[in-house]
Amino acid sequence: MNIISWNRTRLHTILVAGVGILFAIFSSAPSTEAFLPHHSFIPHPVHSKHESTRSSISKMMAHNPDGDGKFHFAIDRGGTFTDVHATLPNGTELVSKLLSVDPANYDDAPTEGIRRVLDAHDPTGKKHPRKTPVDTSLIGSIRMGTTVATNALLEREGERMGLIITKGFRDLLQIGDQTRKNIFDLTCAAPEVLYEEVVEVEERVMLAEFFDEDKSQEEIASLEERKENDDVSKGGWPTAGVGKRVTGVTGEKVIPLQAPDVDAVRASLQKLADKGIQSVAIVFIHSYVFPEHEKIVAAVAKSMACFTEISMSHEVMAMVKMVPRGQTACAAAYLTPKITEYLAGFTRGFDEGLMTNVRLDFMKSDGGLTPVNDFGGHQAILSGPAGGVVGYAKTSYRPSPGNEGANPMPVIGFDMGGTSTDVSRYDGTLELVFETTTAGVSIQAPQLDIHTVAAGGGSRLFLQNGLFVVGPESAKAHPGPVCYRKNGYLAVTDANVVLGRVIPDYFPNIFGPNEDEPLDLEGARAAFRAIAGEEEATGRSIEELAWGFIQVANEAMCRPIRNLTQMRGFDITKHALACFGGAGPQHACAMARALGITKVYVHRYGGILSAYGLSMADAVAEEQEPAKEVYGVSKASGGFDEEQDLSAATREDRLEHLAEKARASLVKQGYPEDSIVIEKYLNM
């Protein structure tokens, strides 16, 4: 039983069509009437300190006369590039890119991107040099999407953590649900668990419904009066059914058989702390309906003041399934400290006004923004690509020119970045999934339905036994592809440079050790000559080799698109392809031709559409709670009769209660109540 509420903005767009495969490059201007009075947020960009880069950026500037006197930033920190979209105090929009990792020149890319904009466009003429805290007096808002949590989960570089679980279930999360990605793989290995240590707590709650169903009221009253579970000896088991019946969150009756022993819990937690573990996840078997026992243990952990992150499964995701609920709680305990650590580093680059005078929001995996203080690790898995989905959904979903009365064509989002490619589908609503598995960890949280493939501009190229191999290894932002002039690796970007798809003269001069050189065409050609000299490549020119690698990369990126459409019964030829990301348009027409798509959209801000999408995203507050109710009643002929839905009134009351909580959360953040839209749904 879920509620999602959001603050909605609107966008108007203009379309200019080409020929052949309909290749549309279009721009969009925000409708200022839809912006919040206190937060007149429009799109933004960034640029380099070099004049050649400023020149290229000036061509992508737009002017909106309704500036509010503040700078507003929307930033997407990707694995290779960080994209910045900025609105100046006078309403002018700027866009730019910078490398996400460049330790020789700056510590944090988003901070550096903001600093560059302020340094060049501060209306007071004040300079903002590196190595000094950024002055936030003119910054109105910062919106960010980040891959910090995703990378930490994939690379298993999260916080050291311990699992606190009901006694007898210590191996439950390691056993998991026995799902095998490939059922014919005899070498299939279970993924590593996120926790290092396990603490078993003697606590027990049982559901009363099935135990009491064949008992009279007198028998139940007798069981409630018995006392043998009041002092359960350590190592023993409580007697089933003995104890008071308590109404749980779902309305079900539960029997708390045994509460946690506070002293025993404290002693066990101290052992974790002595091993240097500062983050814990608490997962009890029936906490989704009766959370009091988790709260008791959490209170003990907080009183010890040695744990920085305490994740309770009933707070993270109050759902009935213990395995995904437990893994989600572990993900929160594992990843949230990494986000906190990143935020601490980010805030160190600014003066003290950042956390008090600047609205700082982060993108969640469900495509909605949330304040920095409410941003948890389990919500951040798709924080980066979610902005791109919002961006193309709000700019590419429109009726065809000359046929404005028809329904808009469904759109496939194709976001090709430096490290990976993300694909998704939009047909009027954002498609959400409520349970996903990432790097072997089941996450029970609303997420956009985004499929990722390890093929991007930075995917490395190999010639193995005469076969063209693309990825999954990435050259990353540092050292990057060969053409970045940092002694990097041969990658897809080098192939595009050699084939003339990337023209150095139109690319900003931000490469090399001093960030002032163009892309290295000759270096890329030399790297391909080295491959052409191998026996396996005999008879092929460097251009033929580069094109071969491009074809392999294209096919790898077509597969998830087919899975999103054809494998679900959708006609792929009746979709438009919205290409964005730094490398997307270079592959757009070849991808469309391979898929049978006849219409391609490329936004004017296609290279930074994830950041642009952040500027248009809605603030979202989600509230949910478990429910156990009968939906409709059985018909004699089978199926359900919704007109005789006996739980409708109760369910509606609970949904309205959740709606009020979500609405109050957004109002507290400063959004006007008349701009809030409520969406109710059941996850059945």
Image (cartoon, rainbow, N blue to C red):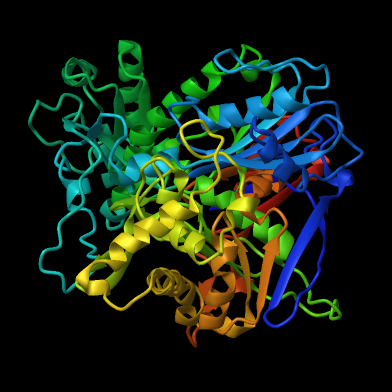
Residue appearing at x 22%, y 38% in the figure: 242
Extreme residue in the right direction = 65
Residue appearing at x 49%, y 26% in the figure: 105
| Residue 420 visible within the image | no
Residue appearing at x 38%, y 57% in the figure: 526
Extreme residue in the bottom direction = 637
Task: Say which of 574 and 133 sits in front.
Answer: 133
Residue 380: x percent and y percent? 47, 42
Side of 533 relative to 115 (left or right): left
Residue 210: x percent and y percent? 29, 55
Extreme residue in the left direction = 235
Residue 471: x percent and y percent? 33, 60
Task: Say which of 222 and 518 sits in front.
Answer: 518
| Position of 130 relative to 206 (above/below) | above
Residue appearing at x 57%, y 27% in the figure: 111
Side of 684 relative to 135 (left or right): left
Place residue 121 in its image quadrant: top right
Side of 15 relative to 528 (left or right): right
| Residue 183 visible within the image | yes
